[in-house]
Amino acid sequence: MADQSTPEASSQEASEKASQKNSGKNSGKASGKTSEKSPRTSETSGASPRVTSPKVTSPSGVDSENASPGEAVSQEPSPRGVLSRRRLLGTAGATGLALGAAGGAAGYAAAPSADKATPLASLGTDTVMFHGKHQPGITTALQARGHLVAFDLAAGAGRKEAAALLRRWSTTAQRLMAGEASAHDDTDVARDAGPSSLTVTFGFGYSFFARTGLEKQRPVALDPLPDFSSDQLDKARSNGDLWVQIGANDALVAFHALRAIQKDAGSAARVRWQMNGFNRSPGATAQPMTARNLMGQIDGTRNPKPSEPDFDQRIFVPASGDPAWMTNGSYAVVRRIRMLLDDWEKLSVKDQENVIGRKKSTGAPLSGGTETTAMNLDKTDTDGNLVVPINAHARITRPDQNGGAAMLRRPFSFHDGIDTEGVPDAGLLFVCWQADPLRGFVPVQRKLDRGDALSTFIRHESSGLFAVPGGAAEGEYVGQRLLEG
């Protein structure tokens, strides 16, 4: 879990960049442009406006789908906006300093009146585009909160009902990701917040195609994953007709999207399983760094990076791929991996490092150097023993040890309390992306299955594989090329 994991550029970096651009001195400027957008209100409840995020653009001007994880992403400006970015964000820095100096108690007295616009903090204004070449939530920087949900189509529901559902879901996702209220019956849970880097991603499971009469369009790459000896899978929490990934940097924004998606399902689909996760909040560390998992290990050092020339080839289905409707899409493997933390924490730090193959404090390989130093697999100690043990997790997962197999891992941690045996029900909601799971996840997992030192301390409890089509163009919904092609 340590090497091929979360994107190297962390969500803290995204927060820092956005904060720099939204500071008092530079408010109203984003890559040399001023973006304006009107606040939106709930169309059904008459609630007070939920402010929509202004444009946030990365220094290089890249869009959200092609941005490196951790870069701020851009949003098209509204041509008829009435609140300028300067008015919306210009006093954010000064307000925060004033409240900090006055002390916590003053915060109550300083609360603005209901009829006065209040600038959002940078974390709230971060926006990811819904429409684009790829779906959001794949190369987006790690988010602080996440929900993974699988649905099964209701009895009698088929292709027509599925198309209507994906149309509703896409409309809702586009609105919420832009910081707007749902089109119908908005719950007002996120009425005070901005988009907070919200992303909603949709995928299709193996069973979806039989349910909709689209078996001929089912990709070969979606064939069920092989059995692994270490699996202890709960079928009730595995697979599903449809899969939705929700991520945001605010818990209420993520929950708001979850409830909207569940309500939109209506009578067409029912929840099969739901898992809730989290990551470190943006800005929680003094400087951007690779994330840590619940074992305390730096987790994500060798993740593929969008800046690498073969990134798209490894992660996304090419235009020449089969079937055509999966062009620019990807395949998500989802695994609930329980960490046996009580057993893990009994090990000394040195023994933990030998299991992983990296220093716990810095993430550097045991062969020496810094976190990003190439691992020397042949280095031995004075007794002739390999410095990086032969069964170390970081050694086994290396692409050069697996025929070049690589995947983009983008997980969430989870903690669901204490189980009936009195031990933590906690671990990793593993999500990995690849152009073909038979060339990405499967060969690596087979290798781990045969002798990974970490396997003693983890348990694979659920599994799913989903075809995630490319992004929807303006005026389209996700999956339209499949359902109406």
Image: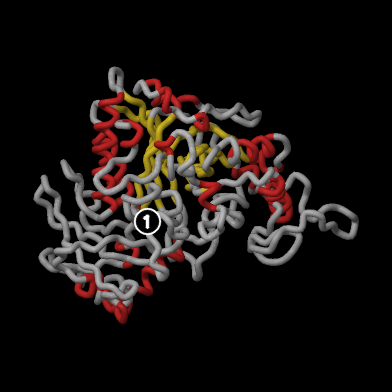
Q: Residues within 10 Å of mark 1 (few under 14, many from 20)?
A: many
Number of marks in picture: 1
- The reply to whether residue 48 is in sight is yes
Foreground residue among 168 and 480: 480
* Residue 273 picture location, percent across and down: 40, 31
Q: Which image quarter: residue 97?
A: bottom left
Vertical placement of residue 155 versus 311, above or below = above
Instruction: Describe the element under mark 1 as helix, strand or loop.
Output: loop
Q: Is residue 131 left or right of residue 231?
A: left
Vertical placement of residue 417 versus 360, above or below = above
Question: Which quadrant is home to the C terminus?
Answer: top left
Q: Please state which amino acid type lies under the numbered disc 1.
A: Asn
Coloration of the structure image: secondary structure
Residue at x 60%, y 30% (from the top left corner): 231
* Residue 426 picture location, percent across and down: 52, 42
Residue at x 25%, y 72% (from the top left corner): 34
- The reply to whether residue 102 is in sight is no
Q: Is residue 132 left or right of residue 6?
A: left
Residue at x 73%, y 51% (from the top left corner): 354
**The furthest residue to the top:** 156
Residue at x 80%, y 56% (from the top left corner): 387
Q: From the image, tell me which residue sits under label 1.
A: 249
**The furthest residue to the right:** 383
Q: Which image quarter: residue 437?
A: top right
Q: Which image quarter: residue 236?
A: top left
* Residue 270 picture location, percent across and down: 31, 28
